[in-house]
Image: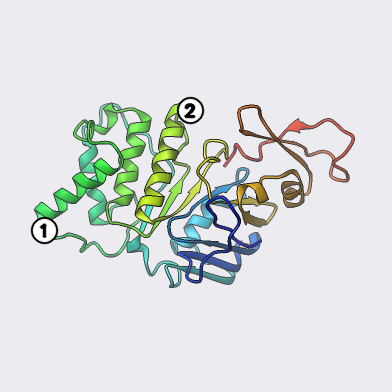
Amino acid sequence: MSGVATDKTPARAGANPTLELQGAAVRLGQRVLWSGVDLALDAGRFMAVLGPNGVGKTTLIKVVLGLLPYSAGTVTVLGKPPGQENHRIGYLPQRRRFDPGLRVRGVDLVRLGLEGDRWGVPLPGARFFHGESRVREAHVRDVIELVGASAYATRPIGQVSGGEQQRLLIAQALVRDPALLLLDEPLDGLDLPSQASVTALVSRICREQRIAVLMVAHDVNPLLPYLDSVAYVGEGHIVSGTPDEVVTSDTLSRLYGTCIEVVRTASGGLAVLGQPQEKASCHGSPYEPVAVSDRR
C-alpha cells in the first residue's frame, strides 16, 4: 500500500513528501474506518481519492487538516503533525449551492480566502497581506486570472455557471499560495465539459505552481489523463499507486473482497464492473455494475 507519484512511469515518493501517511488508522467510536494506510504525495503531484459512499474519503481530508485524530501510525503534513501548517493548505469543501439571487461577487468570495474564511473551516495565519491593500488586491486579481475567471469575477456568484463558480472557489483556495491543495468532490454537479475544464485547470496549476493536490472524486474517468496517483478506499483499507497499478480487476477485487472487473472503453475511459453476491470466485459468471468509482 505504498504511495506512487509519477509523470508516466512508476517512481517512489521523494525524501520529503508534502503529505505522508505510514501505517495510519482512523477509529470512529468502535468502528475502525481504515487502517494500515501508507501513502505519500509530493509537490507538483496530483492524487485522486476514490471509492464508494461512506468508506472514509472525506475523513482522510479531515485527518490531514487535523480536524479528526488518527488512532495509529503517523501522519505528516508539510513536515509537521496535522493541523500545524493549515495556513499553507488550500481547502475546497464539498460544493455549495449558491442561490441565484446572491449578490456577493466572485471577487469578494476570492478575497475572503485572504482572511482565513474557508467556509466554516478557520485556518491560522490570517496576517497574510494584511495592511497592504494594493498588494492584496493585485494578488487577488492575479489568482483570478490564474484560474481563468477574470471575465466574470465581478458578477454576482449566483449568476455564473456551476463551472465558473467552481473556478472562483478554487481561486479562493489558492489565494494564500498554498503548498497543498485539498479538493473535496469539486466536480460534483458539473456537466462533462465543465468537469473536463476544471480538472485540466487543477492539473495545470498543480504542475506550474508546484502544488501537491489531493482530490476526492466520484469518478476516475475525467481525471485519468491528469493523475499521477490514485488512493482507492474500501473495506477498511486504502490502496495507493498509479492508476495503472490500482484501477485493475485484481487490485479492486482484493480490496473489496468481491469480484470486480475493470475494462477500458473504446474512448479510453474505464468501466468498473462487479458481482457483489459472489465472493468465492471471479470467474465463470456474468458481471453486474456496482458503485465502486461513481459514489462518494
Visible residue check, residue 191 = no
Q: How many marks?
A: 2
Which quadrant does the C terminus fall into? top right
Identify the disc placed on residue 215.
none
Residue 135 shown left or right of residue 171 in the figure:
left
Report x, y in % for residue 72: 60, 71
Q: Nearer the viewer, residue 115 or 143?
A: 143
Q: Image quadrant of residue 130?
A: bottom left
Compared to 148, does 234 lie above or below?
below
**Three-letter code for the amino acid on which mark 1 is drawn:** Glu
**Three-letter code for the amino acid on which mark 2 is drawn:** Leu
CB under 8 Å between callouts 1 and 2? no
Disc 2: which residue:
192
The 10 Å Cα crowd at callout 1, few under 14, some 14 to 19, many 20 or more, is few
Compared to 36, does 284 lie above or below?
above
Q: Image quadrant of residue 131?
A: bottom left
Label 1 SS = loop
Residue 252 shown left or right of residue 3 in the figure:
right
Disc 1: which residue:
132
Residue 212 shown left or right of residue 23 in the figure:
left
3D distance between C-alphas at marks 1 and 2 = 40 Å
Task: Identify the residue at image location x=22%, y=31%.
Answer: 151
The 10 Å Cα crowd at callout 2, few under 14, some 14 to 19, many 20 or more, is few
